[in-house]
Image: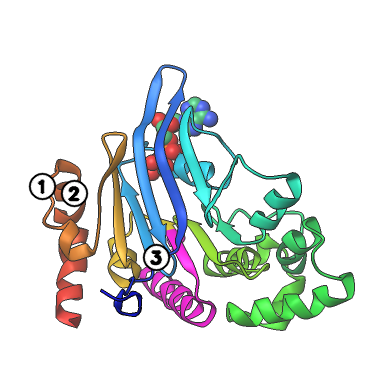
Amino acid sequence: MSEATITHAPSPELIVSLRGISTRFGRKVVHEGLDLDIERGEIVALVGGSGSGKTTLLRHLIGLTQPAAGSVALFGEDLRAGSTRARLARQRRYGVLFQQGALFSAFTVAENIAFPLRELGVVHPHEIDDLIAVKLAMVELEPEHAVLMPAELSGGMVRRVALARALALEPELLLLDEPTAGLDPDLSAAFVRLILSLRQALGLTVVLITHDLDTIVAMATRIAVLADKRIISYASLDDTLQVEHPFIERFFGGAQGRRALARHRAED
Ligand SMILES: Nc1ncnc2c1ncn2[C@@H]1O[C@H](COP(=O)(O)OP(=O)(O)OP(=O)(O)O)[C@@H](O)[C@H]1O
């Protein structure tokens, strides 16, 4: 075969790569030999029982905690590798929305959104106001919301401000921990539409922890199931449903699961 006829499928770009992760808190083993690779452009829903270690995994991903064993790589770089400068550069490439939005209660909306811009010192101070206005518009909030305090916002608005903050540095990877928990169904659906349109516009890769079947059905390109201390299934919704495992049967077979799946099938 001549060289010209050899074709290589482009290898997918791994945004997240977890290999052989083990995590312990005292004698409690949370993860053991856990592997997970996430390609650019995916929306991965990480599901698992309460206390199965989903948030801990998210914290490992951004270096807030370290596993007892195994390696974590983001954008092809091992988190342990590189200088402080490399670490800060990597930090600019992801945004995180923690549970319940977790805004700084003593800061205004504008100050919350500006926080990562100031912290990493990557934007000239006179550009910050313009950027805040852009981010507010991106999450469909009004300019006058900039001066409000978190206590003056509704639950849906808190989530939008937290999302604006997570998007402040125009990340490639967005990590969402229970983004729709506590929102009513209409607000959840609006939040999902917003994330989907931002993903389209910005080419984001998204990892979200959620118990909300409607969100999973509406968004996820793949579902990673964390059970028995590792990822036992990593597949599309339809393929996940074929996996025989007590957690999967419970999770998708309950009343909410059956309703969400029925809506999904009706939409197909
Ligand atoms: N800093 C810590 N010290 C001790 N134990 C911890 C710590 N952080 C987490 N754990 C324990 O590790 C386990 C996994 O916690 P984690 O918050 O990651 O679970 P989760 O899957 O996100 O749960 P949930 O869905 O309920 O939020 C739990 O048993 C928790 O009590």
Left or right of 233 in this view: 101: right
Which residue occupies the foreground of this view, 84 or 121? 84
| Element carrying mark 1 | loop
Q: What is the x, y in percent for residue 91?
A: 65, 55
Q: Quadrant of residue 9?
A: bottom left
Q: Could you say where residue 37 lies in the image, as x and y percent from the top left?
A: 38, 53
Residue that carries the numbered disc 3 in the rendered image: 12
Tags 2 and 1 in contact by the CB under 8 Å rule?
A: yes
Left or right of 197, for residue 233 = left
Q: Is the residue indicated by label 1 positioned so its CB lies within 8 Å of ligand 1?
A: no
Q: CA distance from mark 3 to mark 1?
A: 28 Å
Q: In x, y percent, where is residue 58?
A: 48, 47
Residue 82 painted magenta: no
Q: Say which mark, if any, is on residue 244.
A: 1
The quarter of the rendered structure image containing the C terminus is: bottom left
Residue range of the region highlighted in magenta in the rendering: 179-207
Kindly report the distance in space between the C-alpha atoms of the residues bearing marks 2 and 1.
Answer: 7 Å
Mark 3 nearby-residue class (10 Å; few <14, some 14–19, many ≥20):
few
Q: Which mark is residue 215?
A: none
Mark 3 vs 1, N-terminal side = 3
Check disc 1: other Cα within 10 Å, few if <14, some if 14-19, many if 20+.
few
Q: Residue at x 39, y 22 (%)?
A: 28
Residue displayed at 55% across by 58% down: 97
Residue tagged 2: 248
Helix, strand or loop under label 2 = helix
Q: Along the line of sight, which residue is nearer the eye, 104 or 231?
A: 231
Residue lying at the far right of the rendered structure: 126
The mark lying in front, picked from 2 and 1, is 1
